[in-house]
Image (cartoon, rainbow, N blue to C red):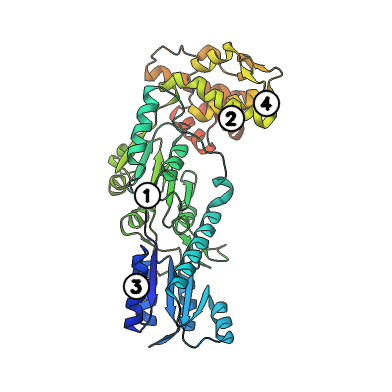
């Protein structure tokens, strides 16, 4: 469990030492200073979860300090202590950014309760920023099935979940990298903290930099107000960067810096900020090959690939398809209020024999679409809308060239049926638009797309 950090600001050495010992006994990590100037520097470098400050300091008052601290990390709770408490002073302090105003002498138990409540409230706000709606979604089991491949994946994930090392998830598009990333966070020592995710594909460098690190007001055209980046929002939690291989190489040094030094700057800012996050990255590309070709920084590759977990393609775990399909159908039937929906034997055979170029995501889309469009409680193979002429028997081992050709034919057929509409074709394949563009290029389908347009 990551300790909460407290910045203690008081020029009275005896009071500061007593408070420090008390807070450390509560398992807080404490940094103590005695002046406004030292507080500003410690706040920036130490990046506390809360600050406890005396009002009167040798080089100023807390009212001078509050605006500066709030401009650095607006969400950090600031608790003010004073021996000259008045209602007028309390009102001024709150207006300047103080979260609590306590009059000396103060009971240590009161400080304990106030800190606990302030830190808990601040973390709840962080989770809301990350998207509370997403956190409320039903938990998806990334290890559903009984195949040797999925059992091996489960064992590997359980071994690394509670470590703090970066993890690189590899595997084909749609194989479940995002689901596994969320599982790793939920089963880590940071599970009570924020989880944020971002797909690096399709972002221009400036936009991606702003999303990751935030920006100050006026940093660029359209930056009408300051914005916190994901590394700021995810402080103490986990950040998941999908398709990291597509990240602009000019942005990679900044990512490396925040991973190694836990420091970053917002766009348009001169001050460094702190961020303590665990990185989980994912890619369907060969990052080692990209690094050798100077398309991905080798130092960043070694940093993000401390632990590598490969997620098997769906065709490598065909025995799991019936259970996966059953789960997807069960959820769809509940939403549609058609509890009698089930897969016919022919439909199950068709699912097990299909090559699944879009992997688990495509399977989910196929089953949900069939449930929606089927006129019968028994979903037939024709309701699945699969290219059965290109199916392979579940016990057959196809060569990589055969599978590539099958994928090419399948993607080409979907593009033809959708008259070259990338959005609709990507939806049917169960993949992102950016991924479909990548497949069109790697499968050499540009000419076919030109003919359709």
Q: Is residue 272 visible?
A: no
Local crowd size for mark 1, using a 10 Å CA cut-off: few (<14), some (14–19), many (≥20): some
Residue nearest the observer in this picture, 437 or 398: 398
Image position of 168 with respect to 379: above or below: below
Q: Earlier in the sequence, mark 3 or mark 1?
A: 3
Instruction: Name the residue beneath numbered marker 1.
Output: 249
Mark number displayed over residue 425: 2
Q: Write down the quadrant of residue 378 in the picture.
A: top right
Q: Earlier in the sequence, mark 1 or mark 4?
A: 1
Instruction: Name the residue beneath numbered marker 3.
Output: 20
Secondary element under disc 4, as helix, strand or loop, is helix
Local crowd size for mark 2, using a 10 Å CA cut-off: few (<14), some (14–19), many (≥20): many
* Separation of marks 3 and 1 at Cα, in angstroms: 44 Å
At 47% from the left edge and 37% from the top edge, which residue is drawn?
179
Q: Earlier in the sequence, mark 2 or mark 4?
A: 4
Residue nearest the observer in this picture, 318 or 10: 10
Residue nearest the observer in this picture, 266 or 4: 4
Instruction: Name the residue beneath numbered marker 4.
Output: 372
- Residue 365: x %, y % from top left: 58, 28
Residue 13 lies left or right of residue 121; in this view the side is: left
* Separation of marks 1 and 2 at Cα, in angstroms: 30 Å
- Residue 119: x %, y % from top left: 47, 63
Image position of 266 with respect to 413: above or below: below
Query: In the image, which is nearer the foreground, mark 2 or mark 4?
Result: 4
At 38% from the left edge and 27% from the top edge, which residue is drawn?
151
* Separation of marks 2 and 3 at Cα, in angstroms: 61 Å
**Residues at badges 1 and 4 in contact (C-beta under 8 Å)?**
no
């Amino acid at each position: 469990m990551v300790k909460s950090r407290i910045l203690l600001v008081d020029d009275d050495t005896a009071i500061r030492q007593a408070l420090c010992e008390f807070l450390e006994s509560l398992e807080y990590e404490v940094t103590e200073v005695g002046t406004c100037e030292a507080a500003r520097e410690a706040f920036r470098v130490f990046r506390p979860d809360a600050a406890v400050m005396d009002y009167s300091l040798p080089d100023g008052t807390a009212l001078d300090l509050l605006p500066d601290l709030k401009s650095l990390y607006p969400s950090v709770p600031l608790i003010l202590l004073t021996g000259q408490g008045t209602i007028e002073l309390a009102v001024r302090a709150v207006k300047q950014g103080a979260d609590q105003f306590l009059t000396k002498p103060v009971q240590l138990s009161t400080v304990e309760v106030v800190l606990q409540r302030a830190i808990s409230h601040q973390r709840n706000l962080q989770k809301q920023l990350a998207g509370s709606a997403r956190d409320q979604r039903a938990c998806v089991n990334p290890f559903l099935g009984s195949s040797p491949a999925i059992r091996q994946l489960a064992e590997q994930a359980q071994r690394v979940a509670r470590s703090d090392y970066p993890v690189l998830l590899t595997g084909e598009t749609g194989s479940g990298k995002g689901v596994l990333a969320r599982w790793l966070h939920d089963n880590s020592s940071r599970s009570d903290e924020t989880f944020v995710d971002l797909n690096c594909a399709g972002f221009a460098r400036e936009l991606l930099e702003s999303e990751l690190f935030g920006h100050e007001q006026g940093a660029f055209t359209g930056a009408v107000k300051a914005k916190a980046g994901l590394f700021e929002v995810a402080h103490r939690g986990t950040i998941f960067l999908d398709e990291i291989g597509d990240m602009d190489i000019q942005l990679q040094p900044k990512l490396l810096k925040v991973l190694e030094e836990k420091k970053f700057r917002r766009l348009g800012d001169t001050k460094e900020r702190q961020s303590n996050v665990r990185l989980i990255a994912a890619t369907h590309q060969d990052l080692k090959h990209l690094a050798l070709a100077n398309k991905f920084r080798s130092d960043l590759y070694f940093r993000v690939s401390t632990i590598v977990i490969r997620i098997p393609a769906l065709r490598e775990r065909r025995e799991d398809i019936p259970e996966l399909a059953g789960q997807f159908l069960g959820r769809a039937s509940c939403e549609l209020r058609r509890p009698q929906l089930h897969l016919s034997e022919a439909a199950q055979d068709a699912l097990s024999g299909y090559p699944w170029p879009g992997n688990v995501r495509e399977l989910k889309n196929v089953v949900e679409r069939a449930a929606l469009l089927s006129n019968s409680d028994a979903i037939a193979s024709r309701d699945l809308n699969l290219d059965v002429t290109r199916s392979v028997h579940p016990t057959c081992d196809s060569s990589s060239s055969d599978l590539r050709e099958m994928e090419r034919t399948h993607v080409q057929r979907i593009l033809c049926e959708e008259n070259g509409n990338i959005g609709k074709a990507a939806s049917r394949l169960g993949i992102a638009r950016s991924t479909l563009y990548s497949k069109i290029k790697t499968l050499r389908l540009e000419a076919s797309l030109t003919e359709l347009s």
